[in-house]
Image (cartoon, grey):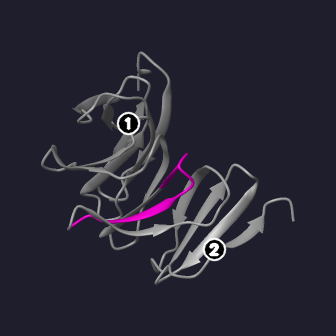
Amino acid sequence: MQPDTLWVRAVDFSPNQSSSYALAAGHDAQVSLWEIGSGGVSHHFEPEKPHIIADVDYAPNGRLAAAVGWSGAVEIWDVVAEKRLASLEGHQGVIYSVAFTADSEHLVTCGEDATVRVWSVGQGAEIARLTGPPGPMRAVATSSDGKTVAAAGWDGSVYQWTYPYIERPTPRNAAQ
């Protein structure tokens, strides 16, 4: 594969065993779908508002992809149909990380506004806002059963919430 013209900040492989694709994105304000075998780009996905992309995630179903970054919006595409499904807004400022749940029905995001948000892909709407950490959140992950969300804060702690996400987060200091 040839390098993009500007910095790549995020990459993710397709979860589909029969597929040989990877998503790459960064400072060129687009998500590129790379065909691993040929090393070429088969499609570029453009965000609704051009911006630096901080993270991408391929949904476990292999059909959807999401990207987040400096625009403060969550972009969702149908990779197979090569079309944008939604541009979701709610965060204030940069969104640093995005992760699909195992069922590909929800997304979790975090950013500089010190919130972790859960989004319904089908509804195209925020369904939960997880708060409590004292500052920006840098990375987010979901458990394989979709019931636990973890987020890393700039304070060096990892926070977790358990569905239905109404409890205060449990901080886990990374240094401990």
Q: Disc 2 on helix, strand or loop?
A: loop
Looking at the picture, tell me which residue is in the foreground, 90 or 98. 90
Q: Residue furthest right?
A: 176
In the depicted structure, whether residue 168 falls above or below residue 68: below
Label 2 crowd bin: few (<14), some (14–19), many (20+), radius 10 Å: some
| Amino acid residing under circle 1 | Ser
Task: Provide the residue designation for mark 2.
Answer: 169
Residue range (magenta): 110-122
Describe residue 65's horizontal placement relative to residue 157 as left or right.
Answer: left
Do the CB atoms of the residues marked 1 and 2 lie less than 8 Å apart? no
Tell me which residue sits at (74%, 60%) in the image.
Answer: 157
> Residue drawn at (38%, 22%), measured in percent from left and top?
28
Q: Earlier in the sequence, mark 1 or mark 2?
A: 1
- Residue drawn at 46 percent across, 84 percent down: 164
Residue holding disc 1: 71
Q: Position of residue 6 (x, y in %)?
A: 45, 18
- Is residue 101 toward the left or the right of residue 150 in the image? left
Q: Image point 33% across, 50% down: which residue?
A: 66
Amino acid at the residue labelled 2: Pro
122 lies left or right of 31 = left
Note whether 52 is above or below 98 in the view shown. Answer: above
Q: Position of residue 98 (x, y in %)?
A: 45, 53
Residue 107 position by quadrant: bottom left
Magenta span includes 121: yes
Secondary structure at numbered mark 1? loop
